[in-house]
Amino acid sequence: MRDFKIDPEHVVSDEASLRALYEATHTLASLKCMDGLDRHAEDFIRLSSFVCIGTQGPNGSADVSPRGDAPGFVKIIDWHTLAIPDRPGNNRLDTLVNIVANPNVGMLFMIPGFDETLRINGKASIVTEPGLLEALAVNGRSPRSAIVIRIREAFLHCAKAFRRSRLWDPEHRQDRSQLPSLMQMLLDQTTGAPTDMDEMRKKDADLEAEYLKTMY
């Protein structure tokens, strides 16, 4: 497959040209943006078990990371402030390193089965205050840090993307067998996956066992 090259003649390079391609947004879309949480946004967060957080590094590189736990795992501190526990991961620390360099973040909250989402933008800090971390503990284990977000914008997002993708529709779920296991794909991309299927199944089982030990 050859690299795709963009014809500069067809690149939109300024906001005026961009907006000329689309009709004006309707009034409700312009008015819906809040500078904090109302009762509907609070209820949405309490029901949410999954959030994606977008960050940007010092060199401008962007990153999006998923965060998930039991519904309401994101703590509402006040109507302008949220706290996300940093549960154990692979210790790449991409999101945290980016926040240290550039505190501006964007978040997308999802509730399984809901086609609507909640978008929140704001400024984040990495916090290690013991009382906060204790409040975010699960099974007696506190996170090492929390991402505390000061909200700048909060607004509900319509269902079109989820309706188009049919994300929650069981009839449109892809069969997991259409891709190799995560461990096999990672090994293919790095050191090479074993050709012996028994050995590969053992590595898959080891990963599942690791999940159980390191979830919190």
Image (tube, rainbow, N blue to C red):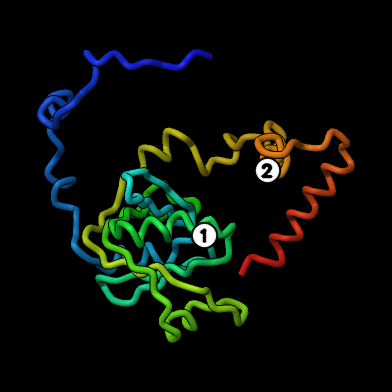
Q: In this rendering, would 12 be left or right of 47? A: left
| Amino acid type, callout 1 | Gly
Relative to 150, residue 187 above or below: above
Q: Residue at image x 41%, y 47%? A: 63
Within 10 Å of disc 1 (Cα), the crowding (few <14, some 14-19, many 20+) is some
Which residue is denoted by mark 1 in the rendering? 68
Q: In this rendering, would 23 be left or right of 110? A: left
Residue 18 position by quadrant = top left
| Amino acid type, callout 2 | Leu
Please provide percent x and percent y for residue 2: 49, 13
SS for dot 2: helix
Which residue is denoted by mark 2 in the rendering? 182
Q: In this rendering, would 35 be left or right of 67? A: left
Within 10 Å of disc 2 (Cα), the crowding (few <14, some 14-19, many 20+) is few
Q: Residue at image x 62%, y 78%? A: 139
Q: In this rendering, would 27 be left or right of 172? A: left
Q: Earlier in the sequence, mark 1 or mark 2?
A: 1
Q: Residue at image x 22%, y 66%? A: 36
